[in-house]
Amino acid sequence: MPSSKPISKDKIIEELSFQNYISDEKERNEIINKCSAVLDAQIAKTYDQKEQVEHTLNFIKELWNKYDCKEIADIYSNFIKIEEALYGLERKEENGEGYRDHFIHMFNTFTFGLRIISFLLDRLDSTKAKQLFKIDDENLKEKGLPFSSNYSYKQRLFYLWTLIATFHDIAIPIQHLTKIGEGINRFVQEFGWLITDPSVSMRYFDSSQLYHYFCLLSSIYGGKLRLEDNGTKYLRSKRSQDYLTKILGREFDLRNHGVLSGFFMTKIIEEIFLLDRGSKYHLIPDQFNTYTEYVLEQDIARAALAISLHSMKEEQKISKIFPIDFSTFPLTFLLILSDELQEYLRWEGTSIKRDMKFNYQPKLEVKVKPESFSIRIKILFSLDGKQEEYIKKRANVINKKIGINKDVKDIDAASEVIGNVVKENLEKKLNLGDYFNLN
């Protein structure tokens, strides 16, 4: 296999283009420093998971501190704690199964997607970029909200992607409740005991809001993110979107982590302003009504829709909701793309040691034709030869699951097996063709 020099931390930081999105120099430098520390840990201490988790948490804290949402950091601190338990409870060495990291994964999803967004923004003028991402400059101060400034379309896009990427798997532990019960049972059954699955109960306030929430997401989906009211609102479909409304409700009951994550993200952002949990902005009732109309039911709902759709997997839904087209739902498309490709630097708890398949951030080559919005992306993955045995082992586990008993002999064949799984998932979920070509 030809060797490829891994991409450097400085190159990744350059491609992230934080200067496009964060105007305050002090804020920008703090976020860049925290992001650099995560990338340093991934490069210099590739096999030190605890170091990477610590720096990732510091980055998340700094990022949400910018948006006056400090308490979000507490959610991620608790997420890390339950994730530690999941590694042990879901590990089955006998058949190569185990829990996969979702915390650092959310950081890697964020940076991968932001690199693509930044590449595209650098190659398009503002009119084309607004058309491509279905977004416009913000005008919330004129609506009576007490914010210090309006967001440019780039700042608004960054906020949207931050919501989508850093929250998209926040509800994974709830989807895994059954596996948590199974893991505990593997111990207590040694003594002849049995426990039932852990269960959760919703707040009555939340359950009363669900139907309205699903209808909101469905109406934005039906409007295909077309803008109205000078770019401040998304067009809602006039016709009821019963199919998606009911599918979202069904998946919520089945603990689909994407649908749960979108709902949790919405409730967290809502309560920061509803219950005055931030330090900067305290909205009076009329201002909260305006915030609901122009933010919660617009960009927050758009982010929740993207998060909800990314984890739909059953064949019945794939045929009716997928493939997603970049020109219609660009950020949903990018979330699925970034999420499915994130096989690199992803910890897998198939043994006490924990391991990963590909241990470098990928290189990106992006080309776009502004006149037709035709996008071509080439992604180059690198791997460490020391990981050969583990990569072959993972490929054999994949083959066994799909009924192929042929032993994978070398790292090239193993990479192809793993790559084909990613390829098949992407082709089911995304419209990859003339207008968005992926290599």
Image: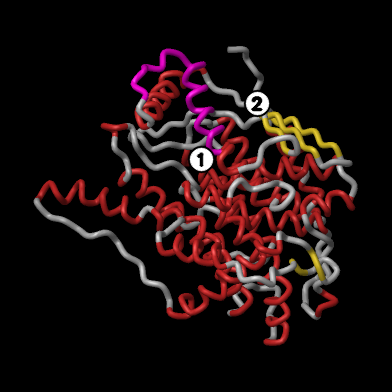
Is label 2 or label 1 in front? 2
Indicate how the structure is coloured in the image.
secondary structure
Within the magenta stretch, is there residue 372? Answer: no
Badge 1: few (under 14), some or many (20 or more) residues near its Cα, within 10 Å?
Answer: some
Q: Quadrant of residue 117?
A: top right
Which corner quadrant holds the N terminus? top right
Relative depth, front residue between 212 and 410? 212
Of the image marks 2 and 1, the number of the one nearer the N terminus: 1
The residue drawn where x is 38% and y is 38% is 349
Marks 2 and 1, how far apart in space? Answer: 26 Å
> The residue tagged with tag 2: helix, strand or loop?
strand
Helix, strand or loop status at disc 1: helix
Q: Is residue 61 left or right of residue 437?
A: left
The answer to whether residue 12 is seen in the rendering is yes
Eyeballing the image, is 368 above or below 159? above
Q: What segment carries the magenta color? A: 404-425
Examine the image and state in which quarter residue 216 appears. bottom right
* Amino acid at the residue labelled 1: Glu
Which residue appears farthest toward the bottom when viewing the image? 285
Q: What's the magenta bit mostly, secondary-structure-wise?
A: helix
Q: Which residue is at the front of the view, 6 or 379?
A: 379
Which residue: 31% across, 54% down? 178
Residue 83 position in % (x across, y down): 41, 50
Q: In which quarter of the image is the C terminus?
A: top right
Q: Please tell me the numbered disc located at residue 51.
A: 1
What kind of residue is marked 2?
Leu
Give the residue number, with chain letter if any, for mark 2. 380
